[in-house]
Image (cartoon, rainbow, N blue to C red):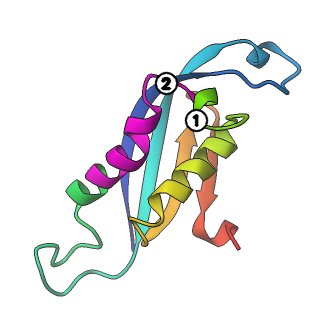
Amino acid sequence: MQIRKRFSFEAAHVLPFHPGKCARPHGHSYRLEVGVRGPLRDDGPARGMIEDFDTVKELVRREAIDALDHRSLNDVIENPTCERIALWIWQRLLPVLPSLDELVLWETATSCAVLRKADLP
C-alpha cells in the first residue's frame, strides 16, 4: 500500500542550457507529492499506518521544502530542471524516509516529473 502527502513551495530558477524563455530568470509555484510504501504497522503509535502523515510532513519540510522555498534553485542545484530537482529531493529524503516510493514534482499545472523507486539502480 502507498500513502501520499502533498506539499508546495515557491522558487525561481534559470535553465542555462534551455534554448527558449526558460533561459531567463523566472519562478514557479511547485507542488510536490511524496509517496511512501510499506505494510501497515502492527504496533506503536503508528499502528494501522504505513507512516504517520505528521512524520512525513516534518521530514519533507525539514529536508527539502525549507531548503528550496523562496530560493533561487540555481544556488542549490546545478541546472535545476524539474527532473534534477526531483532527484535532489529524493536524495535528501531517502536517508530519513527509507520507505520513500515515489515523488511527483509539478512545475506547472500541466507539467511534472515523476521519480519512482523502481526507476533507480
Residue 60 highlighted magenta (yes or no): yes
Disc 1 marks a residue whose amino acid type is Val
From the top left corner, tell me how far across and down residue 57 is, in percent: 28, 50
Of the numbered discs in the image, which one, if any, rests on residue 71? Answer: 2
- On screen, 89 above or below 22? below
Residue 80 highlighted magenta (yes or no): no
From the top left corner, tell me how far across and down residue 96 is, in percent: 39, 65
Magenta-highlighted residues: 58-73
Element at label 2: strand
- On screen, 56 above or below 19? below
Query: How many numbered discs?
Result: 2
Quadrant in the picture for the C terminus? bottom right
Work out whether residue 71 or residue 34 is closer to the camera in this orientation and state it: 71
Left or right: where 8 falls relative to 89: left
Residue at horizontal 29 percent and vertical 73 percent from the top: 50
Q: Is residue 95 visible?
A: yes
Residue at horizontal 60 percent and vertical 63 percent from the top: 116
Label 1 crowd bin: few (<14), some (14–19), many (20+), radius 10 Å: some
Extreme-right residue of the structure: 19
Residue at horizontal 47 percent and vertical 34 percent from the top: 68
Check if mark 2's residue and mark 1's residue have beta carbons within 8 Å: yes
Disc 2 marks a residue whose amino acid type is Arg
Left or right: where 17 falls relative to 43: right
From the top left corner, tell me how far across and down residue 67 is, in percent: 43, 37
Q: What is the CA distance from the residue labelled 2 to the residue labelled 1?
A: 8 Å
Quadrant in the picture for the N terminus? bottom left
**Residue at image mark 1:** 76
Figure quadrant of residue 39: bottom left
Residue at horizontal 40 percent and vertical 49 percent from the top: 63
